Amino acid sequence: MPMSYCTQRLRSMSLIILVSALAACSEPPPPLTETVRAIRTITVSEPASGKIRRFSGVVEAATTSSLSFEVPGNVQEVKVDVGDSISKGQVLARLDEQTFQLNLDAVQATVGRAEAELADARREWDRLRRVVEQSPGLISEQALDQARTNYETARKNLGYSSSRLNLARRDLERTELRAPFDAVIASREVDAFQEVNRGQKLFDLYVEDAMEAAISIPESEIQQVYLGLAGEVRFPASPGQTHKAVVTEVSRSAGAANAFPVRLTIYAENSRIRPGLTAEVTLILGGEQEEIAYLIPVAALVPRGGGTESHVYVFDDATSTVKKTAIEHGGIRDNNVVVNSGLSAGDIVATAGVSFLRDGQQVRLMEQ
């Protein structure tokens, strides 16, 4: 009996252990966490066609304005300072308006007197004309002419006084200096309680989102620069950033050292690009019909795997993923591929381990 009981007990325990093991085997494995791969990249910027020339210049605002009062006076208040963003119609400074208000009151009194004189002259002329109509010969022609002259003089005096009133009102309005457009204050040359003259410069403004790079092109190369020529701009103050630009102004006369001033509009919405920054401009000097290509390392090419198209992986900064992108290339040059189409300046291309990447994979950029 004891042996049978022990045997049965051992069998029960073995069955429990077996069931527990089978249950453990049936549970799903924990999900695998995908490791975010770090990739080495380059930023597409180096042109491969034409004659590459780099010029140093300076950033200037495309739209600027100098502001001044249109009337002289004593500055009562200055409401903005250098670096402030302003809106169209905003009051920037105000003159003491007391003198202008007194002048307006005086001219209004003159207008009232002129209106009364005109009314008297009109009544007198109308009265003499009625007398002449009713009793010809009773009023002399000379008296009638004098009444008409007095009426015309009074009418002109009223017109003159009304014009002076409009000017006085306008001068009073001009005691407030307002912004002509949305802009940024570049410089301020006025303080409160300062006496200023009409036309004296008080503020310089510039439009923040319209910047140009001003450079000088030597006379030996100016013939290859034309309106619409594409270029790239870098700023030593912001290393690693490249912005597209296009030539929008080419001077017809040379300046210092027989160099021709040239301006390029910078396509960038970046508040850090400000007037006065040093700009390094890259231009491709060739023919207007010459296409621009770019150089990327051979290692950036994705193995074809039997296909005929060439591809690279382009990093998308918004999603931190890579996109498999088709390109057309024009051969190899010094361990670099000449890309004719498919890429643009500023694209970030993976240059190592591309065999282990896939379209849409999340990655992170390897620190340079």
Image: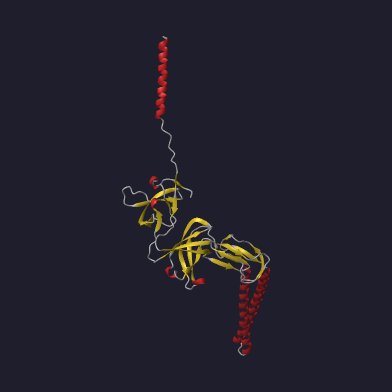
Judging from the image, the colouring scheme is: secondary structure
| The one of 78 and 234 positioned closer to us in this rendering | 234
Tell me if residue 133 can be seen: yes
Left or right relative to 197: residue 339: left
Left or right relative to 341: residue 59: right
On the image, the x and y values in percent for residue 85 come to 57, 60
Q: Residue 111's image quarter?
A: bottom right
Q: Determine whether 294 is above or below 119 in the image.
A: above
Instruction: Tell me the quadrant of the picture where the N terminus can be found.
Output: top left
Left or right relative to 8: residue 160: right
Outermost residue on the front side: it is: 334
On the image, the x and y values in percent for residue 157 come to 63, 79
Outermost residue on the top side: it is: 1
| The one of 340 and 33 positioned closer to us in this rendering | 340
Label tally: 0
Q: Residue 172's image quarter?
A: bottom right
| The one of 89 and 308 positioned closer to us in this rendering | 308
Tell me if residue 140 can be seen: no
Query: Which residue shows up at 63% across the image and 64% down it?
Result: 93
| The one of 119 and 329 positioned closer to us in this rendering | 329
On the image, the x and y values in percent for residue 222 come to 45, 69
On the image, the x and y values in percent for residue 327 come to 36, 54
